Amino acid sequence: MAQRLIKQKIRSTEILAGRLHLSGYGRGEAPVDLRLSFGCVDRCPVPWPPMTIEIVPMTRADAEAVLAFWRGHDGVGLGDSDTPGEIAAYLDRNPKMSLVARENGRIIAAVLCGHDGRRGCLYHLAVASSHRRQGLGRRLVERCIESLRLAGIPKCNVYVYGDNLGGREFWKETGFAWRSDLIMMQRRV
Ligand SMILES: CC(C)(COP(=O)(O)OP(=O)(O)OC[C@H]1O[C@@H](n2cnc3c(N)ncnc32)[C@H](O)[C@@H]1OP(=O)(O)O)[C@@H](O)C(=O)NCCC(=O)NCCS
């Protein structure tokens, strides 16, 4: 009975960069039975208590908070289209594709993902500096790529500032190739 209740409380479990994440529990809340069920009370291969990171689709209600999050990160270029209203419209147009990651309620990563029926596009991927190089960025990208694949979209583009060397390396590592035969051009509508 207790075990069933525990399982009901866990909304998802994820192994992320070698750490066990249990959403549904705050730090130190998960009961010892749960640790036993994962066989990791004494010889836990991961830090305990686990970090509570959840990765969920971004919603309209997140728009202001993710904009504030992005504003704090070099490498994310916010422009005219980055208002809460425009972000909400983008989410409506591309439901359940953009993602936000939270740890104990605090946003630690976010990305916009969508498509025009032909090509996918990822915008504004950022991971909090405290959580970088732990596989979170890659995790978000793979989730986005999977949702594009399910939507029948065969290719995905990203825009990266040329001088963002860390960002460029990240995209290369996650399977994106630099198209040196193309340049980007833009015009106001
Ligand atoms: C780019 C960014 C999203 C990467 O997020 P992350 O969670 O640290 O990335 P991951 O841990 O999944 O990295 C996967 C791999 O990418 C490569 N990588 C990631 N960041 C890198 C960096 N700064 N320099 C070189 N390689 C990097 C590594 O090969 C890494 O694997 P490793 O850690 O095992 O060596 C993060 O650094 C960030 O938010 N930067 C600021 C915003 C930004 O520039 N966003 C890109 C907009 S185009």
Image (cartoon, grey):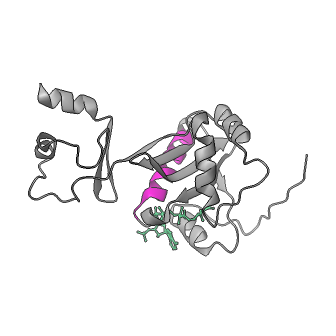
Q: Is residue 117 visible?
A: no
x and y percentages locating residue 107 in the rendered image? 49, 50
Of residues 44 and 106, the one drawn nearer to the viewer in this rendering: 106
Left or right of 62 in this view: 31: left
- Above or below residue 134? Residue 13 is above
Of residues 153 and 62, the one drawn nearer to the viewer in this rendering: 62
Of residues 92 and 147, the one drawn nearer to the viewer in this rendering: 92
- Above or below residue 182? Residue 147 is above
**Magenta-highlighted residues:** 134-149
Q: Picture quarter containing residue 62?
A: top right
Of residues 31 and 125, the one drawn nearer to the viewer in this rendering: 31
Q: Is residue 86 visible?
A: yes
- Image quadrant holding the C terminus, namely top right
- Image quadrant holding the N terminus, namely top left
Left or right of 52 in this view: 165: right
Q: Does residue 139 belong to the magenta stretch?
A: yes
- Residue drawn at x 23%, y 49% is 28
Q: How many marks?
A: 0
Q: Does residue 187 belong to the magenta stretch?
A: no
x and y percentages locating residue 116 in the rendered image? 71, 39
x and y percentages locating residue 8 in the rendered image? 25, 28
- Above or below residue 92? Residue 99 is below
- Residue drawn at x 28%, y 35% is 10
Q: Picture quarter containing residue 3?
A: top left
Main SS of the magenta part reads helix
- Residue drawn at x 57%, y 64% is 171
Q: Which residue is the extreme one toward the left?
A: 42
- Residue drawn at x 21%, y 56% is 48
x and y percentages locating residue 39 in the rendered image? 11, 49
